Image (spheres, rainbow, N blue to C red):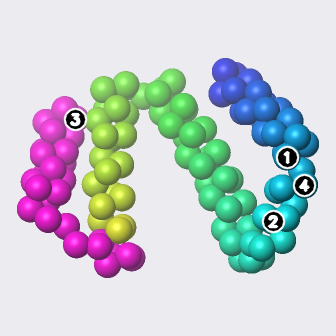
Amino acid sequence: MIFVIGALVYGIMTMFYIAHHQDHLSAQMEKLAVPLVIVLIFASILGFVANMMYTGLIRHGQIAVVSALTSTVPVFVSIIAFLVLGEALNPKQLAGIGAIVGGTILLS
């Protein structure tokens, strides 16, 4: 319930911002490509679903396990950046990934 209220407040604040800056935003929106707008909408929906799942897991699961799994987000971001963007991982980052994975295993 609190998540829905937060989403409504955020949506109302966003509408006020859009109404106040309508001229500037409409000029910027004309420059955006249609596929980018579709990706942004998809990302927004995916983020909403992820937050709903996270809230449900906290409500019905063990908070220690949920928080341990949440700490693995940087690991997945690093792996995706390596695979998709071709970014290099230095030894410190690899050690950090190992520490996060090891800590998550120990906590679960």
Q: Residue at x 90, y 55 (%)?
A: 23
CB-based contact (under 8 Å), mark 1 and mark 4: yes
Sequence order check, earlier mark of 4 and 2? 4
User: Which residue type carries mark 3?
Assistant: Ser
Judge depth for marks 3 and 2 and give the one in front: 2
How would you rate the neighbour count of disc 3 (Cα within 10 Å): few for under 14, some for 14-19, many for 20 or more? few
Measured in 3D between alpha carbons, the distance from the residue under mark 1 to the one under mark 3, in whole angstroms, is 47 Å
User: Which residue type carries mark 4?
Assistant: Asp
Sequence order check, earlier mark of 3 and 2? 2
> Which residue, given by chain and number where applicable, does mark 2 sit on?
29
Q: Residue 8, percent across and down?
A: 78, 30
Residue numbers of the magenta segment: 82-108
The answer to whether one can see residue 90 in this image is yes
Query: Judging from the image, what secondary structure is the residue with disc 3 in?
Result: loop
Sequence order check, earlier mark of 4 and 3? 4
Sequence order check, earlier mark of 1 and 2? 1
Indicate which disc residue 23 carries: 4
CB-based contact (under 8 Å), mark 1 and mark 2: no
Vertical side of 31 occupied by 44: above or below: above
Q: Residue 52, percent across and down?
A: 60, 38
Query: Judging from the image, what secondary structure is the residue with disc 2 in?
Result: helix
Q: Residue at x 83, y 32 (%)?
A: 12
Magenta-colored stretch includes residue 70: no
Indicate which disc residue 21 carries: 1
CB-based contact (under 8 Å), mark 3 and mark 2: no
Measured in 3D between alpha carbons, the distance from the residue under mark 4 to the one under mark 2, in whole angstroms, is 10 Å
| Front in this rendered view, residue 91 or 97 | 91
